[in-house]
Image (cartoon, rainbow, N blue to C red):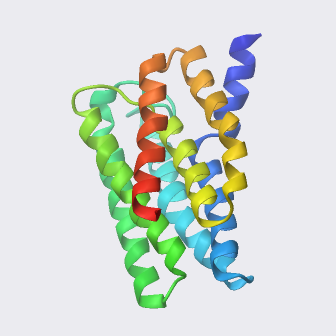
Amino acid sequence: MNTTVARVVTDVLQPRNVLVAGLTGLGAAAAGDWTGIGWGLLAALCAGVVPAGYIEWERKRGTWGDRHVVDRTKRAPIFFVILGSIGLGSLAMVLGDAPRDVLVAMVALWAMTVGLLAVNTVWKISVDSAVASAVVTVLAVVHSPWWIAAYPLVAVVCWSRVALTYHTTAQAVAGASLGAATAAAWLC
């Protein structure tokens, strides 16, 4: 039963989905009107959808068994794809005069990814936990402090990663801590 619930949580609250929902909402809040939704969707595309597409492409090629890429030694290419995708998206945002908060959120996600890559060279860290935590922190700082009330969802993501034995408790907490710290550092 716990494994079934954990699987649902980890699939529903995977980074791609959290980024699409969170960054689209951030775009709307940052612009104050519907125009921001497009910028939020561009951010979500670059930070979440493109990396998820790359993982799925490599999975179909047989490089990895599933989207979780549990072997940390095989994760580096994913981080480089994320860094490149976020970098190109950020450049488009600068050139297109995107709302400042969306661009700063992208820079925070880029910095978080650098941190994840660095830690991953020596120790496995939870990307799912980092992304969930970063998105809640971004929304709390940029949109409303009330978003901190969504932090139990981050705890549920951490729990699911541990329950599925993809991570230890320390790896999940470290990911959530890194996500919150990098988001807060760039946005505050």
Query: On the rendered image, what quadrant is the N terminus found in?
Result: top right
Is residue 94 placed above or below 64 in the rendered structure? Answer: below
Location of residue 104 in the rendering, given as x and y in whole percent from the top left corner: 45, 70
Q: Quadrant of residue 123?
A: top left
Q: Nearer the viewer, residue 168 or 48?
A: 168
Numbered label tally: 0
Residue at the (42%, 24%) spot, across then down: 171
Q: Quadrant of residue 164?
A: top right
Is residue 29 placed above or below 140 in the rendered structure? Answer: below
Is residue 57 shown to the viewer in this render? yes
Residue at the (46%, 63%) spot, across then down: 188
Is residue 164 shown to the viewer in this render? no
Location of residue 10 in the rendering, given as x and y in whole percent from the top left corner: 64, 31
Residue furthest to the bottom? 96
Location of residue 14 in the rendering, given as x and y in whole percent from the top left corner: 61, 40
Residue furthest to the top? 1
Residue at the (58%, 60%) spot, across then down: 141
Q: Nearer the viewer, residue 146 or 120?
A: 146
Location of residue 100 in the rendering, given as x and y in whole percent from the top left corner: 50, 79
Residue at the (49%, 31%) spot, across then down: 68
Is residue 105 placed above or below 72 in the rendered structure? Answer: below
Is residue 38 placed above or below 119 in the rendered structure? Answer: below
